[in-house]
Image (cartoon, helix red, strand yellow):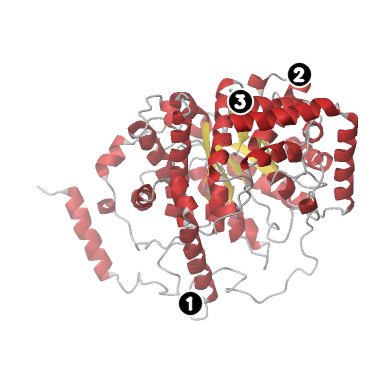
């Protein structure tokens, strides 16, 4: 009696031998374009054909349905038929009032969640009048120095109905406190607030470098936010464990999975050491990944990460609650893969990346604007980015079937391969003492640098084709170019004036006492979050609160 899998393997091998020349990289391509590499962006070797022999039939049968552990095929049985992913466009520039106007336009156009980009001074815990903030106020995000700014940011927006994601890390506890107090002053109870605060400090040391304090107190503050949300902000995700930034820095897909999940392990272990209920913590965790243009690999990446996290939570932490084992994730399309040359091509890239995120089962999505390689997106390009999501949701049929590519020989084989490669990297991280030790020793950074260098060298050698950069570079360019957002130079003076006015009108003695309480809480390792909330209510600024913590913890200057 014949064995179907053995027959499939023999037939596949016979096909490969018979069609070796036809399947060779570059066969049939014009000489001036050259061959297409047989490897993905991540360096994975891609087969010319995938067959049943490449698929684990037993695993396929065991993981046949979405909504059941390990959630390879999706978190919910009906997936987007039950609820569409959240259209969460990332926005922030200039003043709180300017960003508020953009938010309201996006909501009116059909956006279903807000995502706040903060400027560099805010991300580094500095007020607009700090010398190091000069020239950077409002440039790459919105300037938020106090609760008053937070109230302006959400003017005429119902905080009890909108879901807000805040991309903030080192001063996450402070900005979350501002948001909570803004809600209180608008009459919205903390448990009614919904959203996510990124609060992922490990990837800052590994890739972005927007840290303030040394790793140990930074991790303690991260867990403070987790504990606070578990107790008070039940509708908030206190941590968005981010692979996005390491991917944008240049790492590969399996590295993105491995670094993200290894960081996740470190946070869960830190929460457990604090005595938090891991079943509850697991329910509130969220993740954040990039979507690159390598379409099939990206879909497989999301499926592999979801499966791996469910297994990790069960096997390593003994989590029994299915909801606490789910990898809920936001996706942003890859800004690093957008080109300043022929930027209109980025419309195509973003649509492909977004479709990969949708077919991979994301819970929320940001689509980059086509002109972001040149500057902050203008109003038209921001609307086109949102429209891209709406076309995918309403016109393609992609939302009608859960995991529509599940069962594809190629997708299933790639999912298994990415899981195997990511697992090997995670084992290496464990050998190095875990994520915190590996980041501190520079292991993540070295891996990222090597992968980024290899990719860039492939482009410069012409081995990796990028349209408009080393393929089809001739032609008439649009001389007018895109119209992107420009930041008025007067904004910085206005922001400084607002901070000065705030300090004059507030109760100075109350603010001073609140900042002293923040320092005492940091020294005694007690209720830092409560002290930060009190300081926010006293109208202390982000720079003052972070400055009080700096006095105790010092500033991290990076690896020597």
Quadrant of residue 330 within the rendered picture: top right
Pointers 1 and 2 in contact (C-beta within 8 Å): no
In the rendered view, tell whether residue 33 sits above or below residue 163.
below
Q: Which mark is residue 187?
A: 2
Q: Which mark is residue 34?
A: 1
- The numbered mark, 1 or 2, whose residue comes first in the sequence reads 1
Pick whichever, 361 or 257, lies toward us: 257
Pick whichever, 129 or 116, lies toward us: 129
- Residue 403 horizontal/vertical position (percent): 44, 40
- Residue 148 horizontal/vertical position (percent): 81, 32
- Residue 366 horizontal/vertical position (percent): 62, 45
Gap in Å between the C-alphas at discs 1 and 3? 62 Å
Asked if one can make out residue 278 in the rendered structure from this viewpoint, the answer is: yes
Residue at figure coordinates x 61%, y 25% from the top left: 527
Closer to the observer: label 1 or label 2? 2
Residue at figure coordinates x 69%, y 25% from the top left: 161
In the rendered view, tell whether residue 31 sits above or below residue 140.
below
Pick whichever, 359 or 372, lies toward us: 372
Q: Which mark is residue 109?
A: none
Q: Dot 2, how many residues are within 10 Å of its Cα: few (below 14), some (14-19), or many (20+)? A: few
Closer to the observer: label 2 or label 3? 3
Q: Quadrant of the C terminus?
A: bottom right
- Residue 451 horizontal/vertical position (percent): 47, 63
Q: Dot 1, how many residues are within 10 Å of its Cα: few (below 14), some (14-19), or many (20+)? A: some
Helix or strand or loop: what does disc 2 sit on?
loop
Direction from residue 143 to residue 269 in the image, left or right? left
Helix or strand or loop: what does disc 3 sit on?
loop
- Name the residue carrying label 3: 527
Closer to the observer: label 1 or label 3? 3
Direction from residue 457 to residue 515 in the image, left or right? right
Helix or strand or loop: what does disc 1 sit on?
loop
């Amino acid at each position: 009696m014949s064995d179907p899998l053995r027959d499939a393997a023999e037939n596949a091998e016979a096909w490969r031998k018979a069609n070796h020349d036809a399947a060779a990289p570059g066969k049939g391509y014009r000489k001036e374009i050259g061959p297409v590499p047989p490897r993905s962006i991540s360096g994975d070797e891609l087969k010319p054909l995938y067959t049943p022999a490449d698929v684990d039939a037993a695993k396929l049968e065991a993981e046949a349905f979405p909504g059941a552990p390990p959630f390879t095929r999706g978190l919910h049985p009906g997936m987007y038929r039950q609820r569409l992913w959240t259209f969460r466009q990332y926005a922030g520039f200039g003043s709180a009032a300017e960003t508020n106007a953009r938010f309201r336009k996006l909501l009116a156009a059909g956006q279903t969640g807000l995502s706040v980009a903060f400027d560099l001074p805010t991300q580094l815990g500095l007020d607009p009048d700090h010398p190091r903030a000069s020239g950077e106020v409002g440039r790459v995000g919105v300037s938020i120095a106090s609760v008053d700014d937070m109230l302006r940011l959400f003017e005429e927006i119902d905080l009890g109905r909108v879901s807000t994601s805040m991309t903030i890390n080192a001063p996450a506890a402070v900005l979350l406190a501002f948001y909570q107090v803004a809600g209180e002053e608008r009459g919205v109870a903390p448990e009614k607030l919904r959203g996510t605060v990124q609060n992922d400090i490990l990837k800052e040391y590994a890739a972005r470098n927007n840290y303030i304090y040394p790793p140990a107190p930074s991790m303690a503050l991260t867990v403070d936010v987790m504990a606070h949300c578990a107790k008070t902000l039940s509708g908030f995700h206190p941590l968005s464990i981010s692979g996005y930034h390491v991917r944008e820095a240049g790492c590969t897909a399996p590295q993105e999975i491995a670094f993200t999940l290894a960081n996740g392990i470190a946070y869960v272990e830190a929460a457990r050491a604090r005595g938090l209920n891991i079943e509850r913590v697991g329910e509130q965790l969220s993740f954040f990944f990039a979507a690159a243009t390598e379409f099939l690999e990206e879909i497989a990446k999301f499926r592999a990460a979801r499966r791996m996290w469910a297994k990790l939570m069960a096997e390593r932490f003994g989590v029994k609650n299915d909801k606490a084992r789910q990898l809920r994730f936001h996706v942003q399309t890859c800004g690093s893969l957008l080109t300043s040359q022929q930027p209109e091509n980025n419309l195509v890239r973003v649509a492909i990346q977004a479709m990969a995120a949708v077919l991979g089962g994301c819970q929320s999505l940001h689509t980059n604007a086509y002109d972001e390689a040149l500057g902050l997106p203008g109003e038209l390009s921001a609307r086109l980015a949102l429209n891209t999501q709406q076309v995918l949701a309403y016109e393609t049929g992609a939302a009608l079937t859960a995991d529509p590519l599940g069962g594809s020989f190629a997708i299933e084989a790639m999912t298994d391969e990415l899981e195997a490669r990511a697992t090997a990297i995670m084992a290496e991280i464990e050998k190095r003492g875990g994520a915190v030790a590996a980041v501190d020793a520079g292991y993540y950074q070295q891996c990222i640098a090597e992968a980024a260098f290899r990719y860039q060298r492939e482009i410069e050698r012409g081995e990796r084709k990028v349209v408009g950069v080393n393929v089809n570079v001739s032609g008439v360019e649009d001389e007018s170019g895109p119209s992107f957002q420009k930041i008025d130079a007067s904004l910085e003076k206005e922001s400084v004036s607002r901070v000065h006015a705030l300090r004059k009108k507030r109760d100075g003695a109350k603010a001073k006492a609140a900042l002293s309480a923040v320092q005492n809480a940091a020294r005694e390792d007690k209720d830092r979050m409560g002290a930060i909330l009190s300081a926010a209510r006293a109208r202390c600024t982000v720079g003052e609160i972070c400055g009080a913590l700096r006095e105790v913890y010092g500033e991290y200057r990076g690896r020597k």
